[in-house]
Image (cartoon, rainbow, N blue to C red):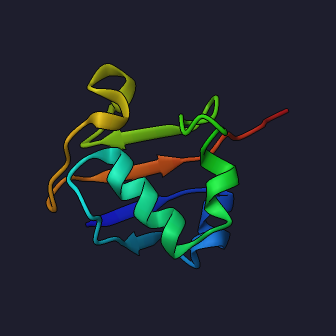
Amino acid sequence: MVVKVFANLRDICGGMTVNVQPDGNRVIDVLEKMVEMFPPIEEEIFTAERTLKDFVQVYINGRNIVHLNDLQTEVSETDQFALFPPVAGG
């Protein structure tokens, strides 16, 4: 599955997209595999309770997962997966 990453996550992942082969078919499985591939991403996206940090956004086919089944949302290889970190502005 191709995951599009944005802002500082691009630096961590080494590019705008990451090819991920998750061990399952849920959003959490994709994110866990990304942590395995890029350990520094963990502190950027997850809380200690293994939930998404405030303002971290995951979109599947243009829909925010909070409006779907959150981290348990099922995904397929052909889905568009986008991961946005918190971004501050001023």
Residue at (55% x, 36% y) in the render: 52
Side (left or right) of 45 relative to 25: right
Which of the pair 62/20 is nearer the observer? 20
Q: Quadrant of residue 13?
A: bottom right
Furthest-front residue in view? 49
Q: Position of residue 9 (x, y in %)?
A: 62, 61
Furthest-top residue in view? 67
Task: Name the image quarter holding the N terminus.
Answer: bottom left
Which of the pair 90/80 is nearer the observer? 80
Side (left or right) of 32 relative to 23: right
Task: Name the image quarter holding the C terminus.
Answer: top right
Furthest-right residue in view? 90
Side (left or right) of 41 relative to 2: right
**78, above or below 74, in the image:** below
Residue at (28% x, 72% y) in the render: 21
**34, above or below 89, in the image:** below
Q: Position of residue 31 (x, y in %)?
A: 43, 55
**55, above or below 28, in the image:** above
Q: Position of residue 74 (x, y in %)?
A: 19, 42
Q: How many marks?
A: 0
Q: Position of residue 37 (x, y in %)?
A: 50, 75
Residue at (65% x, 38% y) in the render: 47
Which of the pair 23/74 is nearer the observer? 23
Q: Quadrant of residue 2?
A: bottom left
